[in-house]
Amino acid sequence: MQILLIRHGQSAGNPYEEPDMPAHGYLSEDGEGQARALRETLVGEHINLIWTSKLGRAIRTAAVALDGHKVPVKHFGFLNEWMPSPDVRNVTSTVWEKMNEGAGSWEAEETWKTPLGEGTLEFVARVGPPFLNELSKLGVHARHGGFVLDDHAQDLTLAVVAHGGTLGTLLGFLLKVPPFPVGVFSFELTAVGRLHFKRQGSVWYPQLVVPAPHLK
């Protein structure tokens, strides 16, 4: 089994909008090009199922980059990006930039939970356990520090299209990296992280595969 963790392309429009399908206008011109380039990379990739967040930039990226993979697509709110507080969500970009500049001067230990929005542990709790619950429905059960896979799930490939913060949080959760306000994983736009599940005894353990860019 493997999980492909895919970040969306460069975004445009309302970053918090959950659109009806099909989703258009949520990637910039560059973002559309990034998604098309990713599609070329993923041609021939075996994928059984696609999950995305409910936000437009993830849905649009999946539609472009995974076009041609005639497999089910599901959209989940728990894969949405970090959530700012409602009272700051609609501030101008200038005000938001100033708020973030101020937050950048805080020590990491002071940022577990701030007035800006969702706390670190809240984010992990929103993303991680629901993801495990959905995996279990596929026959991938969290057990014994790893996963017990039903026979039909052992050759499964799941593509998850979401956001940098979400993917970093999810990756840390699956690899059992202790939560911390400063993330230890960073996803570039349309980057693909690959989690391969290796069997040890009766349990499968996820491993992050780091590709060699010069090898095709």
Image (tube, grey):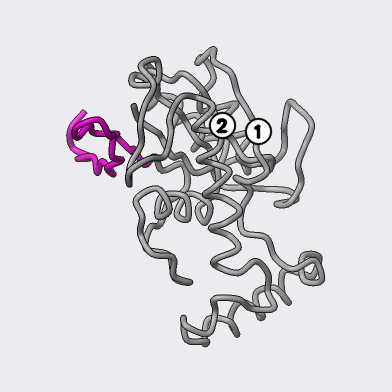
Task: Classify 155 as above or below 212.
Answer: above
Residue under the image location 48 percent in, 72 percent down: 181
Local secondary structure at mark 2: strand
x and y percent of residue 27 in the render? Answer: 63, 41
Q: In which quarter of the image is residue 208?
A: top left
Q: Which residue is tagged 1?
A: 75
Residue under the image location 51 percent in, 24 percent down: 66
State how far apart marks 1 and 2 are (Cα).
Answer: 6 Å
Task: Classify 103 as above or below 50.
Answer: below
Q: What's the amino acid at mark 1? A: His
Whether pointer 1 and pointer 2 mark residues with C-beta atoms closer than 8 Å, the reply is yes
Seen from the viewer's position, the closer of residues 143 and 177 is 143
Pick the quarter of the image with the N terminus. top left
x and y percent of residue 167 in the render? Answer: 48, 49
Q: In which quarter of the image is residue 119?
A: bottom right
- Magenta stretch containing residue 194, yes or no? yes
Task: Classify 64 as above or below 129.
Answer: above
Residue under the image location 40 percent in, 57 percent down: 186
From which residue to which does the magenta span run? Answer: 193-216
Pick the quarter of the image with the C terminus. top left
Magenta: predominant secondary structure element? strand
Q: What's the amino acid at mark 2? A: Trp
The label on residue 150 is none
x and y percent of residue 180 in the render? Answer: 44, 70
Local secondary structure at mark 1: strand
Seen from the viewer's position, the closer of residues 4 and 128 is 128
The label on residue 51 is 2
